[in-house]
Image: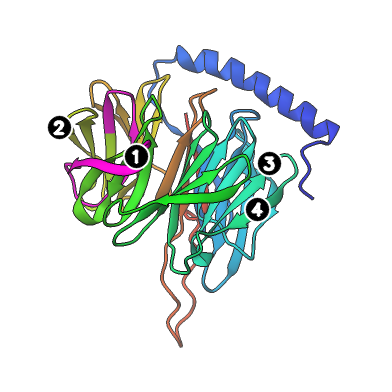
Amino acid sequence: MYNFTKPHIFKKEILIASSFAFAFLTWGHSATAQTVVKSSTAGKGVYEAVVNEQNGFIYVTSAGSRTQPGGAIYKIHPESLAITDSIIMKENPPFGLGINHKTQTLYTTNTRTHSVSAVDIKTGKVIATFNNGKGNSHTREVLVDEDNNLIYISDVGDPSSIWVIDGKTNTYLHSIENTGKTTTGMVLNDRKDKMYITNMGTNEVAVIDLKSHKVEKSFPSGGESPVNLVADGNHIFVANQKSGTITVLDAASGQVLKSIPTGAGAIGISYDKKSNRIYSANRQTGTTTVIHADTYAVLADLPTGSHPNNVKVSPQTGAAYVINKAKGGRPVEGQPAPPADTNGDTITLIR
């Protein structure tokens, strides 16, 4: 039963929040290199995560597999990494995940059913599931603009589009059309009037004017298969999956300032503003790379799991959480089933 209103749970979360405040103070003065603290099972077919700023818990999407269909969002304790609750979504297995911290609403991309769902965190209930009226949508990433209560969804294709969702009514408004070939990652600038996106099909980053809803310019990402990106105001950091690099771009001109080798399959990226660090989840090498956002020095390259897919950082504690997918491959007829992948379908804590 998914219930956040029980008194004992509420008290527990206050204690956790207090421990976060202490952890942040001690972490902020630590000069030690980051290390992997622990890993734990996170569900079947895990994909992405968010950290809830209000209670510190991590929420992870789990889509199951083709042989073991599922669908859930798991609530995970930030220190023990234990699964403490779940929201079942078997009819619309979730992949991408975003959160509006102000409204305490989760948004999932349900790629197999070409849809998006809104989930109330307090009640654990799906409050809306909708699409854009087209049956061939490939919903992928979620970007939440909390100030304007708008949600953006990348719809991958050739050409791609970006859905615009009203967070007040949780309804589809319209799409920004013709964003490029294979649009995946999205990030807003500080003024929330422009959006930077990655177009994997052309190895470019495009800039969208959110008033005109049109692409105003594009520039090379500096790598191959740019899949996701973050920004710090003046710079854009791009994860290039095929080239295994993080490239640093000038946000105004698009000039490539630096290319930083990470590991094969750089796919997930996160920016910790307080520590000024970039995290890159590298799918093929099973590592997560930590980079200084000013000097571009690699601070750590940590083994986290079979296929790191997504990484998020707690703004309260500075802890990073990596979602590791399991190894794929179907069993061969007449052959014994492959052993269970103990390093996959996990969440890893870095501190």
Q: Amino acid at mark 4?
A: Ala
Which of marks 2 and 3 precedes in the sequence?
Answer: 3
Q: Is residue 288 magenta?
A: no
Distance between mark 1 and mark 3 Cα atoms: 33 Å
Q: Which residues are magenta?
A: 210-236
Which of marks 1 and 2 precedes in the sequence?
Answer: 1
Secondary element at image label 3: loop
Tag nearer the camera, 1 or 3: 1
Q: Is residue 291 above or below residue 221?
A: above
Secondary element at image label 2: loop
Q: Please give the residue where the numbered disc 1 appears in the rendered image.
A: 212
Q: Please give the residue where the numbered disc 3 appears in the rendered image.
A: 121
**The label number, if any, that marks residue 254 in the structure image:** none
Where residue 42 appears, as percent x and y from the top left, is 57, 50
| Residue in the image at 54% along x and 51% along y | 172
Q: Please give the residue where the numbered disc 2 appears in the rendered image.
A: 255
**Location of residue 120 (image quadrant):** top right
Distance between mark 3 and mark 4 Cα atoms: 13 Å
Tag nearer the camera, 2 or 1: 1
Q: Please give the residue where the numbered disc 4 appears in the rendered image.
A: 128
Secondary element at image label 1: loop
Q: Is residue 212 magenta?
A: yes
Q: Amino acid at mark 2?
A: Gln
